[in-house]
Image (cartoon, coloured by chain):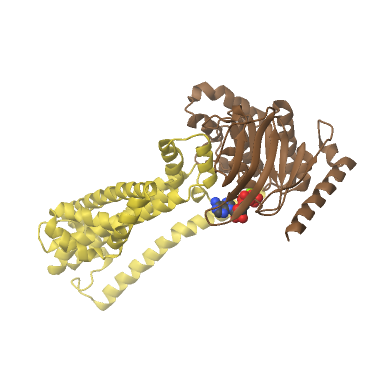
Chain colours: A yellow, B brown
Amino acid sequence: MQTRDESGFVECTANLLRFGLPVVTLAIGLLVWDLIVRLNDIPPYQLPGPILVFKTLVQDWQILGGSLLVTLTTTFEGFIAAAVGGVAMAFLFNRSRLVEYSLYPYAIILQVTPVVAIAPLLLIYLPQQLAVVACAWIVAFFPVLANTTLGLNSVDSNLKDLFALYGASNEQTLWQLKLPSALPHILGGLRIAGGLSLIGAVVAEIAAGSAGAGSGLAYRIAESGYRLNIPRMFAALLLLSAAGIVIFMGLSLISHLVLRRWHESALGKES
Amino acid sequence: MQSSSGHSAGSAVRLSGVTKTFANGVHALGPLDLTIGQGEFVSLLGSSGCGKSTALRLVAGLTVPTTGHVELAAALRSTPRRSIGFVFQEPTLMPWATVWDNVYLPMRLLRRPRAEVAGRIGEVLESVGLSDFAAVYPRELSGGMKMRVSLARALVTDPDILLMDEPFAALDEITRFRLNNDLLELWRRLRRTIVFVTHSVFESVYLSQRVVVMTPRPGRVASEFLIDAPEPRGEEFRTSTAYVAHCRSVSDALARASAKAA
Ligand SMILES: Nc1ncnc2c1ncn2[C@@H]1O[C@H](COP(=O)(O)OP(=O)(O)O)[C@@H](O)[C@H]1O
Ligand SMILES: [Mg+2]
């Protein structure tokens, strides 16, 4: 089977390029960064080199690791709230036009109003931790709602007829038809929501930062900024990006595992 | 209005003066008068958009007529309609479920436990030649195999009537011919009523005892043809002079029906 070997080879090369090239880009970027800092003798309080940032990350791990945990907890809580809230709201809207018409405009308003502007208000009226989670929720729930709604509307109409033909109850239709039909869309929404809840958490932490007690990564960035501890700023930023990437990849993996048996989006190029 | 009284013996379905006008004002069908006998294999033949699918959905009770009556034989009237099997133009399988689970669906919706119907499902899968594929997901199947699953699902409740909406239209000719023969064989064995919607003259003549030619939208009965070819029909029927003659007269009738409307 020469063609199969050949296509396997091509696929392998493609994968190598896909995962290898970003690494190469990163290496070049770090090298250029390092060279610029070294050749121009830029002091660390203006622009620290990559090695110093890495050192700071290790040295300050006590502080930064703790902050990372705080931010991740907020993100996670916001994400869960967004996932449950978004999916539940979409099903409710799907069930009742009245509820949909009454609430959908406000869901959109909540979505289009910049969360940076809402965060300070929330911090006034809610306990700090709750306000931060609420921010993460506000940013993240809309994609879940919108995607789930799209998924529910994409239920195959012939399958719906079939369910009707055999006298399926509302509950049977929900669990055996609507939910599985919408699942790929729901998972797509969750993938977006993961990154967004991190953004929401960061925005709220920064807004809360001036109020004091916060100790998440975003707060560390703001704090380091005041103290001109630029290496630590970079280190915290690095952790935030890494967290975002891990969240996205984790959710993508979950989505892939759930759907790989049946959904086209989970299929490789070969089909 | 859908009534179930005043039914004459021997017929499975009777449509009298049935029309369907959709909410958007499209007058899709009728008035349609049509009686389908028990155990009969009838084809509804008409151009695309003439209301064939609408007619099938009316028979299945998935939509109600705007005027007129749809009468079903007593055995067909149970709700849920376990005695009606429906096959769509697309396989319409649940991609998240295996072949076995797809065929199990009607039984599941009727709240029959898996263990209780496992034998029946094995039997139906066997009869469409898919015993070896029970644990496979739809995406791994060819178009023809998916259609067989769809057929097995319609048959699993052992329905008295099978409504088929252009089930083989999307398949290649070789697969379609094979499924035509399988369907004929199935019908000879079970003698269930089959209403088969198609826009292929050749398919309708090959399969059915009676071809009902419909006018363009709003669909009405333009003419009917009894296909009195001897049984069992097989590939040799496709090349016989009788077949060609039937196809010609049905084809002419279809052309006349379209010309009149134009
Ligand atoms: N739910 C619907 N609402 C409005 N118009 C419809 C609906 N279903 C079908 N139609 C229209 O009714 C006509 C007949 O449709 P259909 O029964 O699907 O025809 P066929 O199956 O013969 O191709 C078409 O013109 C179609 O556009
Ligand atoms: Mg149709």
Query: In the shown orientation, is residue A202 left or right of residue A123?
Result: right
Residue B176 or B154: which is nearer the viewer?
B154
Query: In the shown orientation, is residue B227 left or right of residue B166?
Result: right
The answer to whether any part of residue A158 appears in the image is yes
Q: Residue at x 38, y 53 (%)?
A: A189
Q: In x, y percent, where is residue A235? A: 23, 61
* Residue situated furthest left in the rendering: A212
* Residue situated furthest right in the rendering: B241
**Relative height, residue A168 to residue A156 (above, below):** above
Q: Residue at x 72, y 41 (%)?
A: B43
Res B61 quadrant in image: top right
How many marks overall?
0
Considering the image in quadrants, where does the C terminus of chain B appear?
A: bottom right
Considering the image in quadrants, where does the N terminus of chain B appear?
A: top right
Q: In x, y percent, where is residue B104? A: 53, 31
Query: In the shown orientation, is residue B98 left or right of residue A180?
Result: right
* Residue situated furthest front in the rendering: B6
Res A118 quadrant in image: bottom left
Q: Residue at x 69, y 40 (%)?
A: B34
Q: In x, y percent, where is residue A238? A: 27, 61
**Relative height, residue A185 to residue B180 (above, below):** below
The answer to whether any part of residue A64 appears in the image is no
Q: Residue at x 55, y 52 (%)?
A: B22
**Relative height, residue A43 to residue A192 (above, below):** below
Q: In x, y percent, where is residue B190? A: 69, 26
